[in-house]
Image (tube, grey):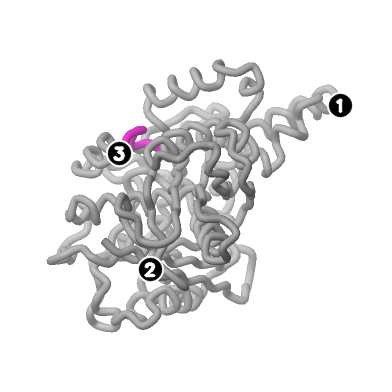
Amino acid sequence: MQKPISITAIASISPLGKSLDEIWNNYQNNQHYITEKKLKNESVLVAEIPLEAKQDIETLRLSDNKYKSLDNTVLYAIYASRQAVKNARWNASNNFGINIGSSRGATQLFEDYHKDFLKNNKAKTLSSPTTTLGNISSWVAHDLQTQGPEISHSITCSTALHAMLNGIAWINSGMCNKFLVGGSEAPLTSFTIAQMQALKIYANQNNEFPSRALDLSKKQNTMVLGEGASMACLESGKKENALAYITGIGYATEILEHNISISTDAKCFQKSMQMALGNLNPDDIDIIVMHAPGTVKGDLSEYKAIQSIFNNNLPALTSNKWKIGHTFGASGSLSIELAVLMLQHQKFISIPYLENQKTPKKIKHILVNAVGFGGNAVSILLKK
């Protein structure tokens, strides 16, 4: 890091709600937000945004004739971006940059258009422009009327944190002093969930806690998909209105054995965490918000990587995926949101089914992890 970066606003729409007060309130309880949804005559576990939030998204869709044909990934991003920019008190003349990504992109529209193509043997007019990945940042830029750079990308489940890395790089280069970064995901479609089921990583039991993220004793995979979007406003230097400072970044990619592999001790995480720590003593880290997707190998390999870096003095560990599911490309930014809220409120959010969970005496430094298919890990160090 050349210099600290301020997070001057965060905003999201997720199964936890749509305002920071509502989200923090829902983090206080031991309730998860995973329900059953009927898809293709099959009942599957998902984490959906609440009804009131769905109504707001529908209102947004109908507010502009051009928005009627957009996928939920784009609408979620617009919704969260509007709130983030408002909270940061930015305006269009700031010409801030935008980097918002998604793992799956406009999967619902893609599935619908492809189904129609198979039926009629021709594509509908809007099938291409509404399903391209560049849709997200370009539509957000259009909605916010900013003239800054706009970038979209897909780097699987570490997408949002890669957007943060990119925003920091632009700011540190001097080419831009403000960047809106984040991720958006609307993956609760029959084909997307079927893909996860085919990998045999999806939860299939609706018990007290369907997703057992960070439960290292579980014998079967318990990943559940969630939907939502989360945005952060980044500014150069230490701002008085900062919610938190980014003081370290790390990233690494593993050599793959197969398409979704990660080593048993997640060497990519070891490298990304070490890089993010820089010269900071590992003992100074109070909390790690883990990626912990709820799979047997994924959770355990990340835990072993943490053990390798922190030895016998592990920080307090947590994750939000037991509560809101895995939101793929948006998950890293939602983890950043949880970290910022814990820094602000000086309260650790634990996981109810874990025994003897360590609780930090103070909360000053939090490390946030994300990794995606392909072994591309990112770690972000936040400071109060």
Q: Identify residue for label 1.
A: 122
Is residue 222 one of those drawn in magenta? Answer: no
Answer with mark 3 or mark 1, whichever residue precedes in sequence.
Answer: 3
Query: Which tag is nearer the camera, tag 3 or tag 1?
Result: 3
**Mark 2 to mark 1 CA distance (whole Å):** 51 Å
**Foreground residue, 380 or 206?**
380
Q: Which residue is drawn at the image coordinates 54% and 37% (left, top)?
A: 92
Q: Residues within 10 Å of mark 3 (few under 14, many from 20)?
A: some
Residue 20: numbered disc: 3
Secondary structure type for disc 3? helix
Residue 269, image x and y in percent? 45, 73
**Foreground residue, 257 or 280?**
280
Query: Which tag is nearer the camera, tag 2 or tag 1?
Result: 2
Asked if marks 2 and 1 touch (Cβ < 8 Å), the reply is no
Which quarter of the figure is the C terminus placed in? Answer: bottom left
Question: Which residue, as the protein is rendered here, is positioned at the far right?
Answer: 121
- Quadrant of res 348: bottom left
Is residue 13 one of those drawn in magenta? Answer: yes
Residue 357: numbered disc: none
- Would residue 47 be visible to someone looking at this image? no
Q: Identify which amino acid the numbered label 3 is placed on.
A: Leu
Give, as a single range, the part of the protein colored magenta.
12-19
Question: Which residue, as the protein is rendered here, is positioned at the far front?
Answer: 93
- Quadrant of res 116: top right
Q: Which residue is drawn at the image coordinates 50% and 51% (left, top)?
A: 178
In the visual, does 311 lie left or right of 11?
left
Residue 247: numbered disc: 2
Question: In the rendered image of this protein, does residue 377 appear above or below residue 351?
Answer: below
Residue 153, image x and y in percent? 63, 52
